[in-house]
Image (cartoon, rainbow, N blue to C red):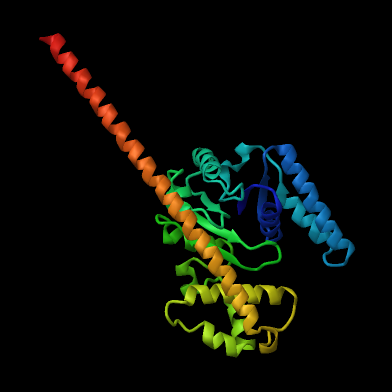
């Protein structure tokens, strides 16, 4: 699979590393090819440090870097998946996806790493809103084994399923419907070693399944990566409360930003309707003038 990652900062570089490590070609883009090359060099230096510490073999590092490429913009034309990690600015994202929409093949899926901007609003910049989804990686991407997949209003179920298949992920169904994807292996590990919390959090009481599965994923990802067994004694109520409060704050921010995006779209609709009236008025006047001349 060929993946084009736009935005080569901490998240973008990490996402490119994740896909390259899985055997995919990852194109890395920044504000310029020179900037993208600098970020690629930083990624190579980071992997070399892991090699020096014995955390990775030189062969593995070289293999990853051989798949991380810096190319011109046009090289993204045949990408299977495009992920944007640019600034959290609606206009910047829409301008980029508009250009990519005109460039990329019809089958290309567009994904946004946004954590707060409406996927529906972003998708409106393209002629393929059914193939646009949110793909929120958790930082640092190479470490956190959790991705939140968000469907916009027009995102097709096939697009979500296709990405999950291509990424070799198995989605927890309750979680996927609400926008969060957690691998089965992570859930099994958690429920096996933490029955006290798993029983309470995975029971669909009062519609809290989405929040609980995201919480599970956060705890699991944090502990599994350390190679530690997840025991009842290592996850206390204060930790759960802290994560719930963080997620609550994020959701409130998301709602605020989505309301702002809706207001912006409504204003754009009003502007377009005004433009229609103006055009109809001009057309009517031209037709009337033509009739007067003929008479």
Write the residue at 61% across / 73% down. Answer: 243
Regarding residue 83, the answer to whether it shows in the image is: yes
Q: Is residue 197 above or below residue 15?
A: below
Q: Position of residue 238 (x, y in %)?
A: 64, 81
Q: Name the residue nearer the viewer: 20 or 134.
A: 134
Q: Residue furthest left?
A: 295
Q: Quadrant of the C terminus?
A: top left
Quarter of the image for residue 229 reads: bottom right
Q: Quadrant of the N terminus?
A: bottom right
Regarding residue 189, the answer to whether it shows in the image is: no
Quarter of the image for residue 22 reads: bottom right
Q: Position of residue 75 (x, y in %)?
A: 62, 40
Q: Name the residue nearer the viewer: 48 or 20.
A: 48
Write the residue at 58% across / 86% down. Answer: 197
Q: Is residue 56 above or below residue 295?
A: below
Q: Position of residue 68 (x, y in %)?
A: 72, 50
Q: Is residue 43 left or right of residue 155?
A: right
Q: Residue furthest right?
A: 52
Q: Is residue 57 left or right of residue 119?
A: right
Q: Name the residue nearer the viewer: 58 or 247.
A: 247
Write the residue at 18% across / 14% down. Answer: 290
Q: Is residue 90 above or below residue 219?
A: above
Q: How many marks?
A: 0
Q: Is residue 290 left or right of residue 98?
A: left
Q: Is residue 292 left or right of residue 114?
A: left
């Amino acid at each position: 699979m060929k993946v084009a990652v736009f935005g080569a900062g901490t998240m973008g570089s990490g996402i490119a590393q994740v896909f390259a490590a899985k055997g995919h070609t990852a194109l890395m883009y920044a504000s310029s090819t020179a900037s993208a090359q600098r970020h690629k060099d930083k990624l190579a230096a980071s992997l070399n440090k892991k090699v020096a510490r014995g955390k990775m073999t030189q062969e593995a590092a070289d293999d990853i870097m051989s798949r991380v490429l810096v190319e011109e913009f046009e090289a993204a034309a045949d990408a299977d998946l495009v992920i944007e990690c640019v600034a959290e600015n609606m206009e910047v994202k829409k301008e980029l996806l508009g250009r990519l929409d005109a460039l990329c093949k019809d089958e290309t899926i567009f994904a946004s790493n946004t954590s707060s901007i409406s996927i529906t609003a972003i998708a409106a910049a393209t002629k393929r809103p059914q193939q646009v989804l949110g793909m929120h990686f958790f930082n640092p991407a190479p470490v956190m084994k959790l991705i939140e997949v968000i469907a916009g209003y027009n995102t097709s179920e096939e697009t979500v399923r296709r990405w999950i298949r291509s990424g070799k992920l198995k989605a927890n169904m309750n979680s996927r419907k609400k926008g969060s994807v957690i691998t089965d292996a992570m859930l099994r590990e958690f429920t096996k070693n933490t029955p006290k919390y798993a029983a309470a959090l995975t029971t669909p009481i009062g519609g809290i399944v989405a929040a609980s599965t995201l919480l599970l994923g956060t705890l699991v990802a944090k502990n599994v990566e350390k190679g530690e067994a997840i025991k009842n004694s290592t996850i206390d109520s204060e930790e759960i409360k802290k994560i719930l409060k963080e997620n609550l704050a994020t959701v409130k921010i998301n709602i605020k930003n989505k309301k702002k995006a809706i207001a912006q779209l409504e204003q754009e609709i009003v502007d377009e309707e005004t433009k229609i009236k103006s055009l109809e008025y001009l057309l009517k006047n031209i037709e009337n003038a033509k009739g007067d001349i003929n008479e």
